[in-house]
Image (cartoon, helix red, strand yellow):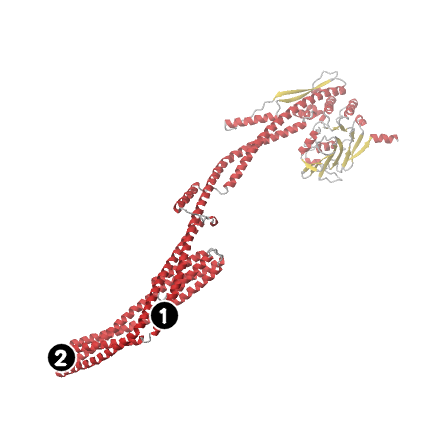
Amino acid sequence: MFLKKIEIQGFKSFAHKTELQFNRNLTSIVGPNGSGKSNISDAIRWVTGEQSQKLLRTKKAEEIIFAGSDKKSKLGMAEVSIFLDNKNKKIPLDFDEVVITRRIFRNGESEYIINKNKVRLLDIQLLLARANFGQGNYSIVGQGMIDSILNQSSASRKDFFDEATGVKEYQIKKEKSQNKYISTQNNLKQSNLILNEISPRLKYLTKQVNKLKKQEETKIQLEELQNNYYGFIISEMNTKIKEIEQKLKEKNKEKENLQIKLEHEQSEIEKEKNKNTYSREFSDLQLEYQKLIDTRNNLSHDKVVYQGKLDIEFSSNGKSNLIWLGNHKEELEKEYDQNESEITNEEKNITSIQIHLDEKIVKQENFISKINEIKSQLEEISNSNTNKDSINIKERIKRLNDSIQNVVKNIKNLSKDELEKEFYFIEKEVQYINKSVNNENSDVKTKYEEVQKEFNKYLSSKDSLVNEIFELKNQKNIIENKLTNLKRRQEDIKIKLNKIKIDIEISNSEDKSKNQKQIEEMIGDIDKKTEILNEKISISKKEIENLDKKNQENRNKLFDAQKQAQSIQNALNIINSEIQDLNINIARLQTKKEDIDNEIKYENIDLEKLNYNAKDIDKDYSLSQINKYKNQSAQIGEIEENVEEEYTKVNEKYEFLEKQLTDLEEASKNLKRIIEDLEIKIEERFNTNFKKINEAFNKYFQVLFEGGNAGLVIKKEENIKTTNTENENSEENEEEKEDIENEESNIYNDRKCIADIIISVKIPGKKLTSMNVLSGGERSLTSIALICAIIDNNPSPFVVLDEVDAALDEANSERFAEIVDMLKNKTQFICITHNRATMHKSNTLYGVTMDDNGISKILSISFNEAEKYSEQ
């Protein structure tokens, strides 16, 4: 592996793109001071990852970029690329040529690139360390580095020898492993903290999940009981409803048969009534006969009165009797007038009541018409109903229709209680249909709500309407009875008044004999009239008897028909009552079923899972068991939502953290083992290579000084690291922290640490052994000997020597050039020099100049080509 080429653009004084090509032979770069020669070594140092602005001879990162001149403006970017031959795969990449590029911009952004792929600085440092290239120490030796090697601090000198002995790669790996170990320890702490945090929550969630499982078991048992219980009840109720519906069907059929028979009997009665053409004649004869009897009775009464008067002797007290008759006449006339006035008022009242009654009957007929209209609308809704209970609704509407028809047909003849019973059934049927339709789609439901609203409106008025009609009828009957009594009383008053008038006339007559004669004539007249009446009564009685005989047969037939019709009507009434009771029972069962359905909905029971085939269910025991499981579920209490999901997540996280904790503990052990192995390897390699460097150092020292001795001595001390625990709150925390810090101390430090590396020399002919009393040339020669020893023992792929021979005289320069020529087979040398001896040993020479624009330029010459050219 060696450096093939370097490309520089915008770096310090190299404004334009500049390219320098190298081979494995010695290459020297020459030029006047200030021309930019050292900028080439700075470019190599910078591209290999140098971060120290002091070593790069700048104060700010942006000073790396060409700052401009009087004739050339400043640039915005600096870029350096080195091309490394990697055929021997010393850099562990699958490329024969590795190109490392570093780029920086004025805004501060920078990037590292290997073969056109962006990488990190750490990647570059690790690759170069594996290739045994140390950009910070002996691989690039700057102008001030020769003397600084001897004046370095203990820590810097240790870093220098770490790189020189080839343990830098292992130290980087060790540092990386140490960082991983610390990170692993932090992760362990964090994982333990998280485990401690989630452990109580996991315990709580475990209890909740167990409760949930118990609740689910209870729910399954409860659901099974409920499915059997409610399925059995519904099945039982459906069976009862079907049985009642079957009975209802039979009763309706029986009712239809009875209605047919009743209609037949009523038809027969009408026929018999039509046959009885002399029924009115019979009534007229009866009336005439009764009048004749009444007239005869009145005449008999008058005759008795007049006969009594014949026995009364007229005296002075007859005048007093006249006074009494006059007073009695006035009382009767006054009563007669009052009765006439009352009859007139009551007749007006009857007329008014009849008008109101007619109005109410019209309203009743309108009510019946509206009920029929609602019935039609219900049938229409039923036909549009797609509910699974549609057939049942249609059957109920049919029953509703029958009830409505019964009301319509018999509303004028039904009593108030009978009407109330019919309306109660109608309301129940409509309520059931309403609940059934409620589960329908919105259109059907809206239609039905409108019909229901209208039906409720009419039902709200039916009670008052029925009551008013019956009240008016009762009032009319009372007044009619009163009028009949009043009219009878008026007839009696008329008869009494006529008698009183006659008595008054007799009392006022002075001729007593004349009066007696008149009374006797009146009695005789009464007898004649009575005889005539008796003849008429006898004739009328015979006519009635004859007519009665003729009509007897027809009346018997009519009576039998009426009796039969009455019997059928009684049976029909019984059937209607039974049908009504059955309908009420169905309504009750349906209501109970609706309650069960609502209970099922409230309990969120799936109807499809109900066991309608359940047998021999003890309902009381099943209900007690259902309540028992409900109480158990209530005792379990509310469980948080998504508790299973949270438990799964927390448990997975807990198990993951436990596994991670185990993996971290294993990784921590492995990292600790790796660090210990690296420490052993570093110590072994350091000691081996340090011994070789020490021997080579003495060898090259003797070459440069033509004698003398030089050596390297390692000074070690025990490393004891303690921890400060003054600010800890408890002894337990102090002990835990101390254990961790002691463990980290063991990882970061060797058992015995290098305190310093002492450079001891003995100059030929001098007794001086201290480095502080050496001259500048002696110090440079000592440093060069040490660098050459390192290169001889652990050669870097290439070494840049930036004017390291500047302080040497001509003789020492030649000796230095001889050593470089000896070592050029082990590494590639690039020397920036003013020394002719070094130039003489070079195969390629680059000259650096600077023009008036302050820009460095490169001139090159190959001595091999020049010799060939000169030989021609």
Kind of element beneath mark 1: helix
Q: Is residue 612 above or below residue 790?
A: below
Q: Nearer the viewer, residue 617 or 564?
A: 564
Question: CA separation, marks 1 and 2?
Answer: 62 Å
Residue 871 lies left or right of residue 293; in this view the side is right
Position in image of residue 493 (x %, y %): 22, 75
Kind of element beneath mark 2: helix
Q: Is residue 715 above or below residue 302?
A: above
The residue at the point 42 percent across, 55 percent down is 242
The residue at the point 75 percent across, 15 percent down is 765
Q: Which residue is mark 2?
A: 310
Q: Is residue 372 above or below residue 162?
A: below
Position in image of residue 865 (x %, y %): 84, 31
Q: Nearer the viewer, residue 490 or 107?
A: 490
Q: Amino acid at mark 1?
A: Glu
Can residue 283 be spotted in the picture? no
Q: Residues within 10 Å of mark 1 (few under 14, many from 20)?
A: some
Q: Give residue 268's mark.
A: 1
Q: Residues within 10 Å of mark 2 (few under 14, many from 20)?
A: some
Quarter of the rendering containing residue 712: top right
